[in-house]
């Protein structure tokens, strides 16, 4: 029993040009370069579809996820004086949530849709402006050690 798993890389069950390729199983176009338009597949098969309203909803979701990544990166949710075990468990949960959201944003951007890319960057930018930059801080001095963020910065 032979299976063709070439994922559209020139095999007999698919076609390909410089910017798109045909998925061999469902005959959907998969973009390999950035494109503009509402007809995209983001995160889930068939979502958001071809309706403009669903595309706008998808953009809002990607924006919210990237904004939340920044909020989590600069949050102060653990109270000073909490036990080390409790604080460690909360930090671990927050880290898992932040990494999961960051991966979802990355996968959404991998749809190669220009709008998705722009709202992901906008969400991270606005989130950093509000939660990470000095723009809305009460003082310009660094926070005391007890007021440090709950999670260390994400590293690439």
Image: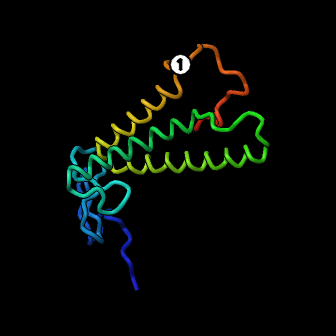
Picture coordinates of residue 95, whole percent (x, y):
61, 46
> Hey, which residue is sitting farthest bottom in the picture?
1
Figure disc tally: 1
Image quarter where the C terminus lies is top right
Instruction: State the residue at coordinates (63%, 37%).
Output: 77
* Colouring method of the image: rainbow
Picture coordinates of residue 133, whole percent (x, y):
52, 22
Q: Report whether 13 appears left or right of 77.
A: left
Picture coordinates of residue 84, whole percent (x, y):
79, 43
Q: Label 1, on which residue?
A: 134
Image quarter where the N terminus lies is bottom left
Instruction: State the residue at coordinates (78%, 47%).
Output: 85
* SS type, badge 1: helix
Q: In front: 76, or 92?
A: 76
Compared with residue 148, is residue 155 higher up or lower down, i.e. above or below?
below
In the rendered image, which quarter is residue 11 located in?
bottom left
Instruction: State the residue at coordinates (29%, 41%).
Output: 115
Q: Report whether 35 appears left or right of 122.
A: left
Q: Mark 1: few, some, or many residues within 10 Å (few <14, many ≥20)?
A: some
> Hey, which residue is sitting farthest top in the picture?
140
Picture coordinates of residue 22, whole percent (x, y):
25, 63
Compared with residue 55, is residue 13 higher up or lower down, i.e. above or below?
below
Q: In front: 154, or 58?
A: 58
């Amino acid at each position: 029993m032979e299976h063709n798993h070439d994922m559209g890389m020139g095999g007999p069950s698919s076609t390909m040009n410089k910017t798109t390729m045909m998925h061999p199983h469902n005959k959907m176009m998969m973009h390999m370069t950035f494109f503009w338009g509402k007809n995209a597949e983001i995160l889930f098969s068939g979502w958001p579809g071809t309706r403009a309203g669903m595309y706008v909803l998808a953009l809002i979701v990607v924006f919210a996820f990237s904004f939340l990544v920044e909020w989590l990166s600069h949050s102060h949710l653990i109270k000073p004086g909490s036990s080390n075990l409790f604080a460690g468990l909360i930090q671990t949960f927050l880290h898992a949530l932040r990494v999961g959201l960051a991966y979802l944003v990355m996968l959404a951007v991998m749809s190669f849709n220009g709008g998705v890319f722009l709202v992901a960057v906008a969400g991270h930018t606005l989130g950093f402006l509000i939660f990470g930059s000095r723009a809305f801080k009460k003082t310009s001095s660094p926070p005391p050690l007890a007021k440090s963020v709950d999670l260390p910065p994400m590293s690439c």
